[in-house]
Image: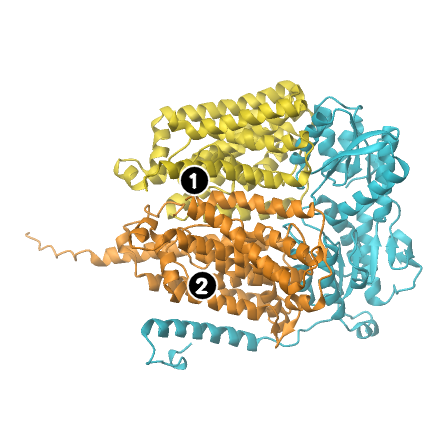
Chain colours: A yellow, B cyan, C orange
Amino acid sequence: MTRYFREISVTLALAALLLALAVVAPSFYQAQPLLSLVAREAPTLVVTCGMALVLICRQIDISVGSQFSVCSVVVGLLTSLHWPLGLLVPAAILLGAALGALNGALVAGLGLPSIVVTLATMVTWREGLRWLREGLWVDLPRDTQWFGLSQTVGQWTLVGLSLMILALLALAMRHLAAGRFVYAVGSDVEAARLAGIRPRWITFAVFVLTGAFTALAACMNVAQSPQVDPNSGAGLELKAIAAAVVGGVAISGGRGNLWGALAGLLLLACVGPALTHLHVEAYWEKATHGAVILLAVVADGWRNRKLDLR
Amino acid sequence: MPLGLVPSLPHLPPPLRAGLRRLGMLALAVSSLLTGCKQNPDSTAGNPSGRAASASGAKKLTIALLPKSKGNAYFMSCKKGAERAARDLDIDLLFDGPTDPDPARQNEIVDNWITLGVDAIAAACENKDGISTALRKARAKGIKVITYDSDSQPNAREFFVNQATPQGIGFILMDEAARLCNTQGEFAVIIGSLTSANQNEWRSFVEERRAALYPNMKMAALRPCDDLKDKAQSEATALLAAYPNLKLFLSTTSLGVPAAAEAVKQAGKTGIVKVVGLGLPNENRRYVKDGVTDSVILWKTEDLGYLAIQAASAVVQGGLKPGDKTFKAGVLGEFQVEGDNILLGKPFIFNKNNIDQFDF
Amino acid sequence: MSFLPSDSSLPNPSMKTPRRSVLSRHETVLLIILAVEWWFFSAGGRNFNTLDNNFDIIRHSVEIGLLALAMTAVILTGGIDLSVGSLLGLCAVLFGALWRDARLPIGWAAALTLLAGVLAGGFNALLIAGLRLPPLIVTLATFSLFRGLAEAITHGMDTYTHFPETFQFLGQERWAGLPAQFPIFLVFTAGIWVLIHRTTFGRSFRAIGFSAEGARYAGIPVERRLAMVYVLAGLTAALAAIIYTARLGQAKADAGTGYELFAITAVVLGGTSIFGGSGSVVGTLLGVTAIAVLNNGLVHMRQPREVAGMLTGLLLLIALSGSVLLKRLATLRQRWQSFPKPTPRISTL
């Protein structure tokens, strides 16, 4: 029970927030806006899965936002060229994997620190995209929204898809040897190496997977809108990191699971709409966001302090 | 750098010696660079009489165009118009702008242009007071300064190419909103960011108009979207749920109009909740055609860019002076000059009937 | 307190070349890069190599330089501070509010702003050193929190302007022939250099970055030293905010957006290890200069801003990969040289 203390406490906090909203602002609970909110967060959830993976492996990837923008624009352009879905999604995943592989090669191959490598690639992709697109949106053909399905079905599909990816990844992390290896590498690289695991390949694979997930999230994002904004990935990496960490994934690696990340993401995603429904002024949003992250982390640290025998 | 040049200091302990030696080499390098550089830059600014005298073998004018930010479709279309003017006038056009929202970036670009020695700067000012500091410096060095789209302080520029006064923009937004709501009801405002100076100015005029003419209308909420279309859509969705009596979305950022329209469409409230705002025709075409957005307000952005460059060039060459009442800008014809404001005209309302005629 | 793994994936760490020669090699590489940039832009750009432009470069990079120097100390301890940019914005807004709304004289407003910076840095320090929370996450949270507070104070919209001429002199004019903010920067740099390279405090920062536990057992008061660096970072952000306001003549809530990443880039480019334990102030200065010259030079060559951004990213990657590859080459060479020479086989045929 105490092993999942963090995940449970975040879920309880989320439940408390939802309960408070039910009492004070029942307008929050309307079917369509709630579904739209969750469908909008579905791509972020997929990216958070990848980010949680990277964090558990004791690395960090702050380039996911720029990767997301690049993939969104490319997917948007290909969609407007009427590529079929069956060709589009694999192509996008390949692109994302390639971007991730670049990060992985530098981090695992050359041993460079991941924060610096991903900082450099983030700036490079972002500026390169801006240079090429100059801020122009990509107009998508009409029938491609929601994969050609109706809006509600499309939204449920996206939500279901993201939850399925989450569940599959969570199961893989727990039951597949490769999943356990990620935890091992994140806990102690030397011990993992001595145990016969190859940390470099695991690290490389984690970055490639993150890139692939980001590309998938970009596809889901494009499916939702009739136009693609090349700035759409701005701030995504911080959102994903905050969600993962609030959900119990440790920055120092080796600890955490994806269900906690889901709870963390939902908690942070509800902050904005909650403020709107509570009729609070907009300029409190950033401060509230920061305060929530701090509370989550401080509570964890407090508990660690009491448990540590110093 | 031969080591013999660096003094040996036998009486100091080795680590200090090594550190001092390294610092000494660094200082030598820096000072040689500084002394090697030119004191007086070659600049063509501040010499208008010389230029006007030598007519056709003269050096091409260099005019620098500063948008509020790059990666913004609105300023890209201004740039297109500016490029057309540059071709017509045979001048060199420099286009550069900040790529991140920090307010100091525009100043840094202007500073760089001053040392580069451009002849004129046409600037859209993100921060009225901050940029005026740099523009005044440019004027002091003889560079002519024009502002367009958003003004700086008046003493920092020669003329302001005004697409429409902020008052005009605010009033027309409120008037359209009132027309769509039959002058009563609640409306929500979506803006780009809370710190955007001219959006705040427009909003204040919207409020002024509302208070004066439409007291039965009330602004229920104001949300920023951090200049992100997806966030604007989420905000609009939340607003629709939180304020069930909402009748209209008003957006002062071009991102907000299609985003709010999409939110209204997804909520199934097309026709019940109206959408109006400042926006580009291309981005809003499909919603206007579908009837989700009634009207989009803007002005001819290409003409704005064209006029700005024409005016800048004319100021440099003496064709436009303080006190002029009209100004002829190339193929666009004559424009009114009111004091130091050159007026493009009134804001233009794009709706179902005319949106197909435009492509920007 | 290292928040990132030690680089144990590299070949045998005991074969590292002596630290001082590695550092000086990195700084030499940076100097070469800087010289190449300078030569390239002087040749290709117009009016690049002029006194006015040099002063512009200095003027534009003083605030980032201050943040990068403070960040060097933080990264030396193996931590990181993502909140310095937002703190700059918050301090700028506080400064404006104190001067305009509370009607304090500029000197008092500046002093109180510095105090506010110290308190904010102290808040970070409390969480990081006191509660032993990971610096990345704490400063990620305060990154939002400080910016949010700045927006809340101004309601996002308010800006503070029309500061007195004597104050704006600090950011815009020249004093004794140099940009007015430069002497402050020099004094600060000298102070930081002495702190990091010539005092036991600086040595303890390195020790903590190398191994916090080891430092603790060696008797170093780890928590107090960590608190010191984060408070220093807060103070520096406040000082940079005052200079920024003087340069711009305006204080807004979004001041300093993106500065923390610029500072981290400069520090890492300068050769400081992001894992902590090694680094130099001179390297950071060279890093700031290299990036500032790159940004400035590209404008003089009429290239758009985005190219500067992309090249900065590439420069960072090349500089880092370069030093790693050099180290590997050195290790390989050592291994080759240490192989016993094969004894010549005498044919028995």
Q: Which residue is mark 2?
A: C281
Q: Position of residue C16 (x, y in %)?
A: 29, 56
Q: Which residue is mark 1?
A: A251
Total label count? 2
How far, Cα to Cα, is label 2 from label 1?
Answer: 28 Å
Lateral position of residue A147 relative to residue C21, left or right = right
Q: Residues within 10 Å of mark 2 (few under 14, many from 20)?
A: many
Name which residue lies at 50% across and 22% down: A164
Rendered position, A185 above or below C122: above
Depth check: give the residue in front, A33 or B149.
A33
Q: Position of residue B162 (x, y in %)?
A: 84, 52
Looking at the rendered structure, the kind of residue marked 1 is Ile
Name which residue lies at 79% across and 37% down: B277
Q: Position of residue C281 (x, y in %)?
A: 45, 63
Please identify the quarter of the rendering in which residue A310 is found.
top left
Q: Residue furthest right?
A: B325
The chain containing the residue under callout 1 comes to: A
Q: Secondary structure at mark 2?
A: helix
